[in-house]
Amino acid sequence: MDYVYGPGRNHLFVPGPVNIPEQVLRAMNRNNEDYRSPAIPAMTKTLLEDVKSIFKTTTGTPFLIPTTGTGAWESALTNTLSPGDRIVSFLIGQFSLLWIDQQQRLNFNVDVVESEWGRGADLDILESKLASDTAHTIKAICIVHNETATGVTNNLATVRKIIDAYQHPALLLVDGVSSICALDFRMDEWGIDVALTGSQKALSLPTGLGIVCASPKALEASKSAKSVRVFFDWNDYLKFYKLGTYWPYTPSIQLLYGLRAALDLIFEEGLDDVILRHKRLGTATRLAVEAWGLKNCTQKEEWYSDTVTAVVVPPNIESSEIVKRAWKRYNLSLGLGLNKVAGKVFRIGHLGHLNELQLLGCLAGVEMILKDVGYPVKLGSGVAAASAYLQNNIPLIPSRI
């Protein structure tokens, strides 16, 4: 029974948590079992091997931690760095801000590079900092791949090129919470030392798993890192990996079975096709926003996100009213504007277990809501723009050909 009942299904279009596939729900609908039995280690072994593919790594070591993305952040930082270490960290929105706050509270020396919200990381400043750091005092570069507060995606390949151009040994730590399994992400090719994601985003699971993947360089750094860590200590995991039991503490059995089902669905569709589907969803949403006469919070096309679009509303409209009306009247969940963009934008999440017709339903709902709050939208305009694009670009479903 829903806590607050509404007829039909809730249309969930926040940028996480996202819709959970029926196959995943069924896989998780099971009793507890002994995680020390042969079954759970055997499944965990395959999960650890298979999860590497979503990071596109063959050399990384993954950790499945019962936590959120915030815990995954802390795991990445405390296992590779020591208090007082200098970090270059990019502030481009609410979630990069929160990660920087964590870095500062963990007593790192954080060199914050701030951009206007709606813009990507200022890589010119990164280049100047690395060029002047001949003593290699910078120990890590921390960047959010996809900032969900503003719908901005950073170019990680360019970040790696800049680091390599100066032959700088700094670690590259990447928050891929709202990008991995939805956007192009290449851990090995881009020389990412620690990448992390959360189960409730593109993996389309409930919240509760922080998935961290560490490069050999990051594992080597963990041997000398002096930050205090207990629950998030990679060494505890590695000890149990060697023993073949894998878990230093009790895992969530149900989430492991859910992860197995989620990965199977991604592999059945094909990871590259999953990424292309998200590109279609993102493009269609942006075309709808343009047809409505509204602006994207993201200021340049090179930073457009294919997992979330932050829509700027006119000054006479409070964006939170759009979100409230969506939920109260249409059973549609949209994302609020956060912090500096609170009241100024609403967010359409288009990631995870989602197809094009579901998106069109959301866009139709947004049009009615815009009409409700007094914006002079032409009903059907955004849906028509998105439909015209999608009708020409949706491929046949491979399993049904």
Image (cartoon, rainbow, N blue to C red):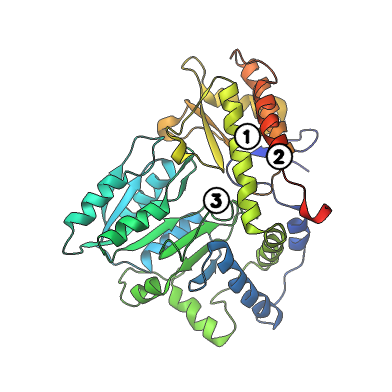
User: Disc 1 versus disc 2: distance between alpha carbons?
Assistant: 9 Å
> What's the residue at 73%, 52% (across, down)?
21
Amino acid under disc 1: Ala
Q: Quadrant of the N terminus?
A: top right
Q: Amino acid at mark 2?
A: Glu
> Where is mark 3, residue-wise?
183
Relative vertical location of residue 261 with respect to residue 128 in this rendering, above or below: below
SS at circle 2: helix
Q: Who is closer to the viewer here, 333 or 165?
A: 165
Q: Residue at x 70, y 25 (%)?
A: 329
Q: Residue 14 in the image: x percent, y percent? A: 60, 39
Residue identifier under label 2: 356
**Residue neighbourhood size for the residue with mark 1, other residues' Cα within 10 Å, grouped as few (<14), some (14–19), many (≥20):** many
Whether pointer 1 and pointer 2 mark residues with C-beta atoms closer than 8 Å, the reply is yes
Q: Which mark is residue 82?
A: none
Distance from the alpha carbon under mark 3 to that under mark 1: 16 Å
User: To which residue does mark 1 refer?
Assistant: 284
Q: Earlier in the sequence, mark 3 or mark 1?
A: 3
Circle 1 SS class: helix
- Residue 184 position within the rendered picture, expressed as x and y whole percent measured from the top left: 53, 53
Q: Residues within 10 Å of mark 3 (few under 14, many from 20)?
A: many
Q: Kindly give the residue lying farthest to the bottom in the view shown.
A: 243
Amino acid carrying label 3: it is: Leu
Q: Name which of mark 3 and mark 2 comes first in the sequence.
A: 3
